[in-house]
Amino acid sequence: MVRLRVRFGSHPVRATGIQLRVPQPSGSVWGWIAIACVGASLLSGCGNHAGSGNTASSGSGAAASTLTIAVIPKGTTHQYWNSVKAGADAAGKDLGVNIEWKGPVLEDDRAGQIQIVQQFVSDNVSGIVLAPLDENALVSPVRAAAASKIPVVIIDSALKATPGQDFVSFVATDNHKGGYLGGERLAQLLGGKGKVILLRYMEGSASTEAREAGFEEAIHKYPGITILSDTNYAGATQGEAQTKAMQMVDEIKQADGIFCPNESSTMGMLQALKQDNLTGKLKFVGFDASPPLIDALKAKQIDALVAQNPTRMGYEGVQSVVAAIQHQTVAATIDTGVTVIDNSNIGTPDVQKLLAGS
């Protein structure tokens, strides 16, 4: 508690904390100016704003408990995002910051996600962690946040903007590498020959487009492998993916292997294969490691899964935006890792640790 006494003639002025109790003076206006200066001095001694219009101090001793970090996923339907949320919540607890979690229900609701970003900017949150569901459509809202001095960290999926300029950092899986590893594993499972299908996810999703490109790059190394189909898109949900896979059943029956680039496309394809009694009859490599997909792997309905670390992604996304608010150095890109899981390594400590957080 700070106490300050100032006397103007016979009228004492007391400042306790940042409140001033001032009797009505009979003196000149100069007494009031002096009082205002006292109040300003007290306020300036209580900490500076972090350049974002919020109450956080910019120094290393910042009162992090005053920060509110908005975390915006692509959607809230997939299990994957629950793991991201768990990581963000853990970081919030460790750092003493408030986490506001909100995203569109489906991953094709661009307008909905834009509106959520804009609302958090209007609310003047301390920082934003965003998984953009479209690499182009979210550029303008992110730049608007930066213009309002609200730092943004991008997670999971890239944005067609510049880290360190339009946003603080990109925290994600090396998605091209993940797709490449998936292609390599499928090629190995096929012995370097056969016909394969790539069921793409959704146009505009930078993360899955990078995985699809990595997959095709790996497959093209094997002249004995032909890509039978790579023009179909699964859509935003498991149900849509299953419907699309059922429409492709004639092509699937001709194929020797399949690759899907995310959780919902992998689950939808799995359900379609089950419906047509095709599980185990062709090699299947999927992406992500939700509990149902791990169960399918153990049951040998899926041969391998390319696994991200969504919990780490959520944690480091929040950690990075808080560091930026506190004017600490943050790397422009942070790779959260990728691992291929199959029945030969699923019991290892490293994989078990990864799965525990998924």
Image: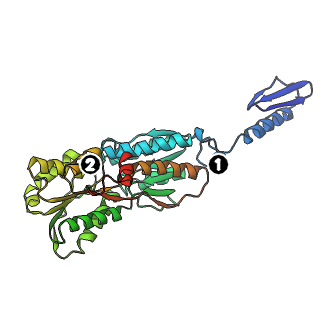
| Numbered label attached to residue 130 | none
The reply to whether residue 49 is in sight is yes
x then y, percent, for residue 275: 10, 47
Marks counted in the figure total 2
Q: Is residue 97 left or right of residue 48?
A: left
Q: Position of residue 47 (x, y in %)?
A: 69, 42
Classify residue 217 as left or right of residue 148: left
Query: Which quadrant: the N terminus?
Result: top right
Mark 2 and mark 1 in contact? Answer it, CB < 8 Å: no
- Residue at (58% x, 49% y) in the render: 325
Return the x and y of residue 127 as percentages of the image width and height: 52, 46
Give the mark nearest the N terminus, 2 or 1: 1
Residue 79, x across and y down, in percent = 31, 43
The residue where tag 2 is placed is 294
Of badges 2 and 1, the one in the foreground is 2
Q: Is residue 131 left or right of residue 69?
A: left
Q: To which residue does mark 1 refer?
A: 58
Instruction: Describe residue 233's horizontal placement relative to residue 319 as left or right.
Output: left
266 in relation to 188, above or below: above
Q: Quick one: SS at disc 2?
A: helix
Quarter holding residue 12: top right
